[in-house]
Protein backbone atom coordinates (compact mmCIF):
# COMPACT_ATOMS: atom_id res chain seq x y z
CA UNK A 1 0.00 0.00 0.00
CA UNK A 2 1.36 3.40 -1.00
CA UNK A 3 1.71 6.28 1.44
CA UNK A 4 -0.78 9.09 0.94
CA UNK A 5 0.55 12.57 0.20
CA UNK A 6 -1.33 15.83 0.47
CA UNK A 7 0.08 18.59 -1.77
CA UNK A 8 -0.05 22.15 -0.58
CA UNK A 9 0.16 24.96 -3.10
CA UNK A 10 3.94 25.31 -3.02
CA UNK A 11 4.58 21.97 -4.70
CA UNK A 12 2.82 22.51 -8.05
CA UNK A 13 3.84 26.18 -7.96
CA UNK A 14 7.51 25.28 -7.70
CA UNK A 15 7.31 23.01 -10.73
CA UNK A 16 7.39 26.11 -12.94
CA UNK A 17 8.84 28.80 -10.66
CA UNK A 18 11.28 31.14 -12.43
CA UNK A 19 12.82 33.19 -9.60
CA UNK A 20 16.57 32.57 -9.47
CA UNK A 21 16.77 32.30 -5.68
CA UNK A 22 14.25 29.42 -5.70
CA UNK A 23 15.90 27.32 -8.42
CA UNK A 24 17.43 24.73 -6.05
CA UNK A 25 13.92 24.05 -4.68
CA UNK A 26 12.46 24.03 -8.19
CA UNK A 27 14.96 21.42 -9.35
CA UNK A 28 14.27 19.18 -6.34
CA UNK A 29 10.52 19.54 -6.84
CA UNK A 30 10.74 18.75 -10.55
CA UNK A 31 12.92 15.72 -9.87
CA UNK A 32 10.55 14.42 -7.17
CA UNK A 33 7.57 15.00 -9.47
CA UNK A 34 9.20 13.09 -12.33
CA UNK A 35 10.94 10.30 -10.41
CA UNK A 36 9.15 9.70 -7.11
CA UNK A 37 5.55 10.92 -7.30
CA UNK A 38 4.26 7.63 -8.71
CA UNK A 39 5.40 5.91 -5.50
CA UNK A 40 2.65 7.73 -3.57
CA UNK A 41 -1.10 8.23 -3.68
CA UNK A 42 -1.24 11.99 -4.19
CA UNK A 43 -4.12 14.28 -3.18
CA UNK A 44 -4.90 17.95 -3.01
CA UNK A 45 -7.84 20.03 -1.80
CA UNK A 46 -10.13 22.78 -3.00
CA UNK A 47 -7.88 25.10 -0.96
CA UNK A 48 -4.88 24.10 -3.08
CA UNK A 49 -6.86 24.63 -6.28
CA UNK A 50 -8.24 27.99 -5.10
CA UNK A 51 -4.77 29.26 -4.20
CA UNK A 52 -3.37 28.08 -7.53
CA UNK A 53 -6.18 29.89 -9.35
CA UNK A 54 -5.62 33.19 -7.53
CA UNK A 55 -3.94 36.05 -9.26
CA UNK A 56 -1.97 36.30 -12.44
CA UNK A 57 1.51 34.80 -12.28
CA UNK A 58 4.02 33.33 -14.75
CA UNK A 59 3.25 29.81 -15.98
CA UNK A 60 -0.15 29.70 -14.28
CA UNK A 61 -1.59 27.57 -17.10
CA UNK A 62 1.24 25.04 -16.73
CA UNK A 63 0.83 24.92 -12.95
CA UNK A 64 -2.91 24.30 -13.24
CA UNK A 65 -2.38 21.69 -15.94
CA UNK A 66 0.10 19.86 -13.71
CA UNK A 67 -2.57 19.13 -11.10
CA UNK A 68 -5.25 17.98 -13.52
CA UNK A 69 -6.21 14.42 -12.69
CA UNK A 70 -4.92 14.54 -9.11
CA UNK A 71 -7.61 13.42 -6.68
CA UNK A 72 -9.26 16.28 -4.80
CA UNK A 73 -10.30 15.63 -1.22
CA UNK A 74 -13.93 16.67 -0.69
CA UNK A 75 -14.80 19.59 1.56
CA UNK A 76 -16.21 18.69 4.96
CA UNK A 77 -17.55 21.28 7.41
CA UNK A 78 -15.31 19.76 10.10
CA UNK A 79 -12.36 21.27 8.19
CA UNK A 80 -13.58 24.78 9.10
CA UNK A 81 -13.88 23.80 12.77
CA UNK A 82 -10.33 22.42 12.78
CA UNK A 83 -9.00 25.58 11.09
CA UNK A 84 -10.65 27.71 13.75
CA UNK A 85 -9.05 25.66 16.54
CA UNK A 86 -5.64 26.05 14.88
CA UNK A 87 -6.09 29.81 14.71
CA UNK A 88 -7.57 30.13 18.22
CA UNK A 89 -4.55 28.26 19.63
CA UNK A 90 -2.03 30.32 17.61
CA UNK A 91 -0.89 27.31 15.63
CA UNK A 92 -1.22 29.35 12.44
CA UNK A 93 -1.49 33.12 11.89
CA UNK A 94 -5.02 34.51 11.37
CA UNK A 95 -3.95 36.12 8.11
CA UNK A 96 -2.67 32.83 6.69
CA UNK A 97 -5.72 30.63 7.03
CA UNK A 98 -4.68 28.73 3.92
CA UNK A 99 -1.80 27.16 5.83
CA UNK A 100 -4.20 26.12 8.60
CA UNK A 101 -6.59 24.75 5.98
CA UNK A 102 -3.86 22.63 4.35
CA UNK A 103 -2.94 21.10 7.70
CA UNK A 104 -6.62 20.59 8.54
CA UNK A 105 -7.28 18.72 5.28
CA UNK A 106 -4.19 16.53 5.64
CA UNK A 107 -5.04 15.76 9.28
CA UNK A 108 -8.77 15.21 8.80
CA UNK A 109 -8.21 12.85 5.88
CA UNK A 110 -5.40 11.07 7.74
CA UNK A 111 -2.80 11.66 5.07
CA UNK A 112 0.54 10.04 5.79
CA UNK A 113 2.44 13.09 4.54
CA UNK A 114 1.83 16.78 3.91
CA UNK A 115 4.26 17.80 1.19
CA UNK A 116 5.27 21.46 1.23
CA UNK A 117 8.05 23.98 0.86
CA UNK A 118 6.39 26.11 3.55
CA UNK A 119 8.98 25.76 6.27
CA UNK A 120 7.65 28.69 8.30
CA UNK A 121 4.21 27.36 9.18
CA UNK A 122 4.12 23.70 8.13
CA UNK A 123 7.37 21.76 7.68
CA UNK A 124 8.90 23.34 10.76
CA UNK A 125 10.34 21.16 13.52
CA UNK A 126 9.85 24.00 16.00
CA UNK A 127 6.07 23.86 15.46
CA UNK A 128 5.69 20.09 15.43
CA UNK A 129 5.09 19.63 19.17
CA UNK A 130 2.39 22.33 19.13
CA UNK A 131 0.73 20.66 16.13
CA UNK A 132 0.88 17.27 17.89
CA UNK A 133 -0.75 18.67 21.04
CA UNK A 134 -3.58 20.43 19.19
CA UNK A 135 -4.27 17.49 16.88
CA UNK A 136 -4.24 15.11 19.85
CA UNK A 137 -6.88 17.25 21.55
CA UNK A 138 -8.91 17.11 18.34
CA UNK A 139 -8.49 13.34 18.03
CA UNK A 140 -6.60 13.75 14.77
CA UNK A 141 -3.37 12.16 13.58
CA UNK A 142 -0.48 14.39 12.53
CA UNK A 143 0.78 13.86 9.01
CA UNK A 144 4.52 13.94 8.52
CA UNK A 145 5.27 17.49 7.40
CA UNK A 146 7.97 17.14 4.77
CA UNK A 147 9.63 18.74 1.77
CA UNK A 148 10.26 16.87 -1.50
CA UNK A 149 13.91 16.58 -0.51
CA UNK A 150 12.90 14.17 2.25
CA UNK A 151 11.00 11.81 -0.05
CA UNK A 152 13.70 10.44 -2.32
CA UNK A 153 14.46 6.75 -2.11
CA UNK A 154 17.81 5.83 -0.72
CA UNK A 155 20.17 4.60 -3.41
CA UNK A 156 22.21 1.75 -1.97
CA UNK A 157 25.06 0.60 -4.18
Image (cartoon, helix red, strand yellow):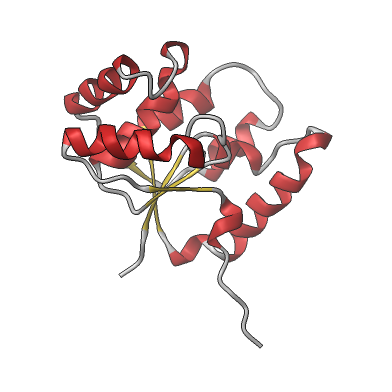
Q: How far across and how far down the image is residue 18, in percent?
A: 77, 35
Q: How far across and how far down the image is residue 131, in percent?
A: 35, 35
Residue 2 lies left or right of residue 61; in this view the side is left
User: Residue at (49%, 37%) from the top-left corner?
Assistant: 126
Residue at the outermost top position: 95
In the image, is residue 25 above or below residue 9?
below
Residue 116 lies left or right of residue 157; in this view the side is left
Residue at the outermost bottom position: 157
User: Residue at (31%, 35%) from the top-left corner?
Assistant: 105
In the image, is residue 87 above or below residue 136?
above
Q: How far across and how far down the image is residue 132, in percent?
A: 31, 40
Looking at the picture, tell me which residue is in the foreground, 68 or 135. 135
Looking at the picture, tell me which residue is in the foreground, 42 or 125. 125
Q: How many marks?
A: 0
In the image, is residue 73 above or below residue 98?
below
Looking at the picture, tell me which residue is in the foreground, 54 or 98. 98
Residue 78 lies left or right of residue 63; in this view the side is left
User: Residue at (31%, 45%) from the top-left corner?
Assistant: 142
User: Residue at (62%, 84%) from the top-left corner?
Assistant: 156
Residue 120 lies left or right of residue 82; in this view the side is right
Looking at the picture, tell me which residue is in the foreground, 47 or 82. 82
Q: How far across and how far down the image is residue 12, in percent?
A: 57, 41
| Residue 123 can be seen, yes or no | no
Q: Quadrant of residue 157?
A: bottom right
Q: Quadrant of the N terminus?
A: bottom left
| Residue 68 can be seen, yes or no | yes
Amino acid sequence: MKNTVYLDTTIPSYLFEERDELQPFVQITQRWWAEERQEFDVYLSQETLAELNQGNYPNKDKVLASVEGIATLPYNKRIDEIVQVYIDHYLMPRKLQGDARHLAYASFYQMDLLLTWNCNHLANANKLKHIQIINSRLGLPVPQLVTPLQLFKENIP
